[in-house]
Amino acid sequence: MQRETIDGGRQLEMARVAAASGLVPQLLSVPELAKLLQVPVPTIYRWRHRGEGPEPIRVGRHLRFDPADVKAWLEDRKAASTGRYRQGG
């Protein structure tokens, strides 16, 4: 029996096709999320440990983040921040 393997490039292309078709959202890796939020990678792991930050999705042993969840988390943070400023600190 032949073992089927997919090289990294092919796997990435399949993920892009799935995301483009709307079947699966394009998930963000920890480094991608850190870059997007302009925070160090350890901050993402610290947030996870504390139960803060966007809700992660475990894919095997990897953490991934749905951009919709990240956006919702940012909107919640924005609302909390602006509410605090409107109240005068």
Image (cartoon, rainbow, N blue to C red):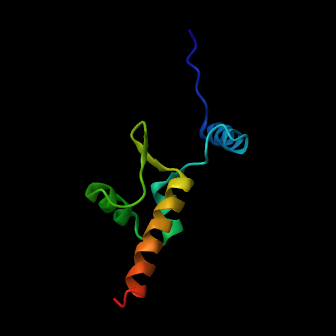
Q: Residue at x 46, y 73 (%)?
A: 79
Residue 26 is left or right of residue 33, and the answer is right
Residue 28: x %, y % from top left: 53, 53
Residue 88: x %, y % from top left: 36, 91
Work out which quarter of the rendered image holds the C terminus and state it. bottom left
Residue 32 is left or right of residue 24, and the answer is left
> From the viewer's perspective, is residue 42 above or below residue 59?
below
Q: Residue at x 58, y 26 (%)?
A: 5
Task: Name the outermost residue toward the left.
Answer: 50
Residue 70: x %, y % from top left: 50, 59
* Front residue of 68 and 43: 68
Residue 24 is left or right of residue 38, and the answer is right
Task: Name the outermost residue toward the front.
Answer: 87
* Front residue of 15 and 56: 56
Residue 7: x %, y % from top left: 61, 35
Q: Residue at x 61, y 31 (%)?
A: 6
